[in-house]
Image (cartoon, grey):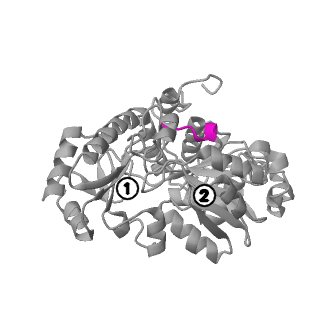
Amino acid sequence: MSEEKYHLETIAVHQNFRGDDKNSVARGIYPSTAFIFDDADHGADLFDLKVPGNIYTRLTNPTNDDLGNVVSDLEGGVGGLAVSSGASAVTATVLAICNTGDHILATKELYGGTLALFSNTLSRLGIETTFVDQDASKEELESLIQPNTKLIFAEVIGNPNINVLDCEKFSQLAKEAHIPFVVDNTFSPPGIFQAKEHGADIIVHAATKYLGGHGNSLSGVVVDCGTFDWSNGKFPAYTTPDPAYHGLVYSETFGNAAFIYKVRTQVLRDTGLTASPFNSYLILNGLQTLNLRLKHVSENALKLAKWLEAHEEVESVSYPLLESHKDYPRAVEYFKNGAGGILSFQLKGDLEKSKHFINHLKLCINAVNVGDVRTIVSHPASTTHRQSSAEELAAAGITDNFIRISVGLENIEDLIQDLDQAIRR
């Protein structure tokens, strides 16, 4: 299959699997902690990275590798790696690129957990982040690039205020600075948006969300697009010998896949951000219906957004394919097959009004996951961005009357009925 060029739907369904040695139609799970070596030399060669193969599930596992490879195929990458969560995907990416004293340029419009990671945990490690408005001019952004800036990070569709990133602007900025452009493509997975085609060098996913799609398994995926030159002089860890592997040089040994190998052989080895094979198996099963789910939730979300926009108790609505959205022209250009199922809106009222609405939902679920087959409603200021400061909330556009909806596969009339009764109660 890998020699042929198939469409995304076909890749997601078949996943480069043509049965195993037992002639099983369905893929199996490998829950083993460790794997048997052929002989003493085989074990040594595996540890020296001289030959590919499985050693220990913290490093390699067939089921986890299948997930990483399938998502990489969907994104057009040269390699993918399954990790324990979306947060792990972001963390592993940063740790494979940055050292103490380095700097990151990131957009303000980020998931609260990512904001906390950059603002708190990474800063304690001596990695500082400058947060910028995604709509800042290229000249303003250029002025914020420092000699020690090692990557640019952004979400294609921002969480939770559903902005649409100008990927070309940030990609060009990264290219001119000779640093990788890292995008979180969780809200706009393959089938909606191909981030590599718009300049991404590295793509991260919370596979928990749309890729899995059923709210039953945590996982993340890192994809190396194979487009960044790690031998450009700014990343000595890729061009100097690694003593842990007897002088191996990543850029020389692995070429344009140097990044993903470094994540696996160094970051995963040392941090244990490993995916569960059981979770990877569930995500792989969910991926088989990705295209169908994305199509339906995109249709539902646009209908719901238009209904909310016309509601007298709603102050504003944010969904990329609404003509009123500030990024609508870009969204129309980017999202030819729909813009996914995430939208946000502001009720007319205060915090108590928002709580009243949440508490009176009968069908929609009050939780903080997204990309589920069920519709999930959340109040970000009370949940995902609870640890954010007032300044950070304001910068992200999150107010007390701000609601996020992850639209599911239900009948749209049932969703409208539930939201309407909760708003009017």
For the residue marked with disc 2, what is the amino acid?
Answer: Arg
For the residue marked with disc 1, what is the amino acid?
Answer: Asn
Say left or right for 161 vs 128: left
Element on which disc 1 rests: loop
First to last magenta residue range: 191-198
The C terminus: image quadrant: bottom left
Rendered view: 122 above or below 133 = below
Say left or right for 167 vs 404: right
Decide which of 259, 189 is in the foreground and name it: 189
- Residue to which mark 1 is pinned: 369
Say left or right for 327 vs 222: left
Decide which of 249, 8 is in the foreground and name it: 8
Q: Residue at x 43, y 62 (%)?
A: 397
- Residue to which mark 2 is pinned: 58
The magenta stretch spans residue 196: yes
The magenta stretch spans residue 236: no
Q: Pinpoint residue 145: horizontal percent, then vertical percent.
A: 72, 62
Decide which of 136, 2 is in the foreground and name it: 136
Residue at the extreme top of the image, as rendered: 4
Q: Pinpoint residue 5: horizontal percent, then vertical percent.
A: 61, 23
Element on which disc 2 rests: loop
**Distance from label 2 to label 1 (Cα)?**
26 Å
Q: Pinpoint residue 206: horizontal percent, then vertical percent.
A: 49, 52
Say left or right for 322 vs 140: left
